[in-house]
Image: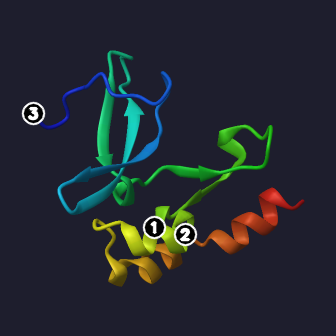
Amino acid sequence: MEQQPVPFNINGEAGIGKLAIGNMTALLATKETPNRTGFLVTDFFAITDLVLTRNGMPIDEGCTISPYVMVTEDLLNTIDNIDLEEIVPSIKNFHILLCIVKKLFF
């Protein structure tokens, strides 16, 4: 069933949410399929095209960021699918500081 669209969405849009099964909680993301027939559900931390923008800024002018940049203290304490050893390497891989300074502040 991998890569099969599902009718899962958040108010008709792709989004991010927690899924709890028993005592395990995972942070998941949905993304609309290219042919718009449904949504693909994936591990939030596997996202490679997460873009940070200012309000009103087109997505193609934003900065691609590591999903770990979005992690809050609450998520660190409650999410089971987070790889703590991947946080720093993932953030370093995106060179976000230079992008933010160039695109979001000027």
Which label number is shown at residue 1?
A: 3
Residue occupying image coordinates x 66% and y 41%: 60
Q: Give how far across and how far down residue 101 sits, in percent.
A: 80, 68
Mark 3 or mark 1: which is in front? 1
Relative to 37, is 54 on the left or the right? right
Task: Give percent across and percent down for residue 71.
Answer: 51, 67
Q: Quadrant of the N terminus?
A: top left
- Going by the numbered disc 2, the residue's amino acid type is Thr
Dot 2 corresponds to which residue?
A: 72
Between 103 and 69, the one lying in front of the other is: 69
- Tell me whether the residue at label 1 lies in contact with that at label 2, contact meaning CB atoms closer than 8 angstroms: yes
Q: Which residue shows up at 17% across the image and 56% down it?
A: 22
Q: Residue at x 33, y 70 (%)?
A: 82
Front disc: 2 or 3: 2
The residue beneath circle 1 is: 75
How far apart marks 1 and 2 lie (CA) works out to 5 Å
CA gap, disc 3 and disc 1: 28 Å
